[in-house]
Amino acid sequence: MSDHHVVVVGGGFGGLQLVNGLKGAGVRITLVDRRNHHLFQPLLYQVATTILSTSEIAWPIRRLYADRHDVTVLLGEVTDVDSGVKTVSLRNGLTLRYDTLVLATGATHAYFGHDEWEPVAPGLKTLEDATTIRRRVLLAFEKAEMEADPAVRDALLTFTIVGAGPTGVELAGIIAELAHFTLPKEFRNIDTRKTRVVLVEAGPRVLPAFAEELSAYAQKALEKLGVEVHLGKPVTECSADGVRIGETFIASRTIVWAAGVTASPAARWLDVPADRAGRVIVEKDLSAPGLPDVFVVGDTASVMRDDGKPVPGIAPAAKQQGGYVAKVIRARLSGKPPPAPFKYWHQGSLATIGKSAAIIDFGRVKLKGWIAWWIWGIAHIYFLIGTRSRFSVAWSWLWIYLSGQHSARLITQRETMREEG
């Protein structure tokens, strides 16, 4: 093994693909992440909506690399990068020296200048976010069951999702199904079928990244489930009492934010140009401008396609970028010519609406309905890490499909009703 030290910050799809791509390259790798697990983020909304448990979509990073003696895993948070002396500083005071640095630090929710909304309108990026949302959704029904005031009860049974991208659409569909089909027999004082699920989108249509025909199908499918879709007006206020859409106030005690993201502070650490979302504007080989030994991948990187459109912030894109950077590093170490500039291959866009409908946009081929749902399910199970995870997720989906019962409706945190009030 050579002395060349590759430091990878971030154990998401891009970071892990990079580490996997460097297997046998003869380098020392240190993988740093703020959490000890890799998260299969595309299914995070299913944890938030009681379909899957946390262990079905997350795996300890150390376990993944237990047999890779070239990989050292550290639990820590990066606070700064000094590209001049090639060091990475961690919050615990540790300093790591690198020969090559790869930043795959992801993104978090963007509130467009209203960060004060975050406590009442959590986003969905981590397991903690998912379990927080799940707890709030389930507690809303529990509180409504005991509430004597009709106005407060109605507010408790109103769930608002801000943002109609894939995450917002998927959340709205599952919450509506939970309220209208799974829970009605379990409560005595409330009719959960009267639950309002409100989906708000500032743009003119849901799922704007999809073809218009698929967007229209998704909206009709949502409305068939009872979801109220509000288009063309942004949210102007979020509070513990509800949301304001334009001039209209909707009393809602549970709000979920799915309207936008902002990148990690990587551009600030490196002192390099960034786009409006804070993503590093990388070179064609995904290196940071003026820093050939620093690469940026995934949601932290701003990468343009040949058609002038940005590479989407989705798992396949991050994996392709991580794999590409591994090839660049290998070529440099072996003295071989570098690979051609990075080129993103779009494998298609997918989104679900409830438990048996989905849309898939492969470009020329567009699918919708239950066939698309099965293809969506097979694709996600294929990408899951480990046979056990594939089996348990498939079993959870089959159980819900046949019985209509969600398998993870547990309020496990210690937070009490008073603290949530």
Image: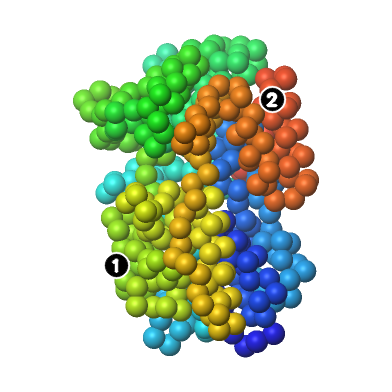
Q: Is residue 289 above or below residue 47?
A: below
Closer to us: 141 or 182:
182
What residue did someone put label 1 on? 273
The residue sitting at 42% across, 78% down in the picture is: 292
Secondary structure type for disc 2: helix
Visual colour scheme: rainbow
Residue type highlighted by circle 1: Pro
Q: Is residue 391 left or right of residue 278?
A: right
The residue sitting at 73% across, 71% down in the picture is: 68
Q: Position of residue 241 (x, y in %)?
A: 35, 30
Q: Position of residue 354 (x, y in %)?
A: 56, 24
What residue did someone put label 2 on? 400
Closer to us: 91 or 323:
323
Q: CA distance from mark 1 to mark 2?
A: 47 Å
Secondary structure type for disc 1: loop
Can the viewer see residue 95 in this picture?
no
Q: Earlier in the sequence, mark 1 or mark 2?
A: 1
